[in-house]
């Protein structure tokens, strides 16, 4: 039986492919840049996740005398889940904790992106960790929707 893709997920898949990132999930925001980032921070806080760092790439570019459209990264996670994954495959530490990037395109469009947990599962060959990956996928999906929806 053939399966018809939801138009929203088709847009996300096409968008991710167009932006060239293997394993990257890209969602276009209905909000402006600051609103998208603020909503992401609120959603991460509401989920009880630990924030490890915030990077403001455009501010750092300005400090170096250069210009860059708005671009930030939020690094966050759940140490209990991440530890399970790192115990199964220590190399996954290169991609943990989780991070979400938000940037503004030259067109004014705001994009949010993160690495697909399913991609990480395949990349690091973590058999037996599907339950953790499913939790991470659901979490990232909810965070992305909270940040990008009106």
Image: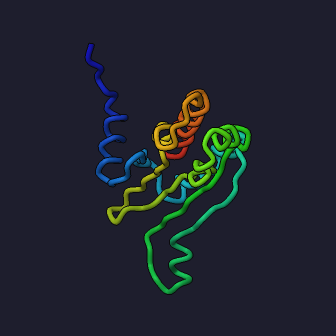
Q: Is residue 150 visible?
A: no
Q: Is residue 77 visible?
A: yes
Q: Is residue 36 left or right of residue 43?
A: left
Position of residue 62 relative to residue 15, above or below, is below
Q: Identify which residue is drawn at 41% across, 45% down.
A: 23
Name the quarter where the N terminus is drawn. top left
- Name the outermost residue toward the top: 1
Residue 49 picture location, percent across and down: 70, 44
Residue 124 coordinates in the image, percent (x, y): 52, 43
Figure quadrant of residue 44: top right
Could you tell me which residue is drawn at 28 percent across and 23 percent down? 4
The location of residue 103, given as percent across then percent down, is 45, 60
Camera-side residue: 29 or 47? Answer: 47
Of residues 148 and 143, the one nearer the viewer is 143
Q: Residue at x 42, y 53 (%)?
A: 111
The answer to whether residue 17 is left or right of residue 129 is: left
Question: Which residue, as the protein is rendered here, is positioned at the far left?
Answer: 2
Q: Is residue 141 above or below residue 33?
A: above
Q: Is residue 37 left or right of residue 104?
A: right
């Amino acid at each position: 039986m053939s399966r018809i893709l939801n138009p929203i997920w088709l847009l996300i898949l096409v968008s991710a492919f167009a932006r060239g990132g293997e394993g990257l999930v890209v969602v276009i925001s209905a909000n402006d840049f600051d609103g998208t980032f603020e909503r992401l921070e609120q959603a991460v806080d509401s989920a009880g996740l630990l924030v490890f760092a915030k990077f403001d790439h455009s501010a750092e570019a300005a400090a170096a005398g250069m210009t860059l459209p708005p671009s930030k990264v939020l690094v966050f996670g759940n140490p209990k889940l991440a530890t399970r994954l790192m115990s199964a495959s220590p190399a996954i530490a290169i991609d943990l904790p989780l991070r979400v990037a938000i940037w503004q395109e030259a067109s004014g469009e705001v994009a949010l992106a993160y690495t697909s947990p399913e991609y990480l599962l395949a990349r690091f060959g973590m058999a037996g960790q599907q339950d953790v990956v499913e939790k991470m996928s659901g979490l990232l999906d909810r965070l992305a929707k909270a940040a990008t929806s009106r």
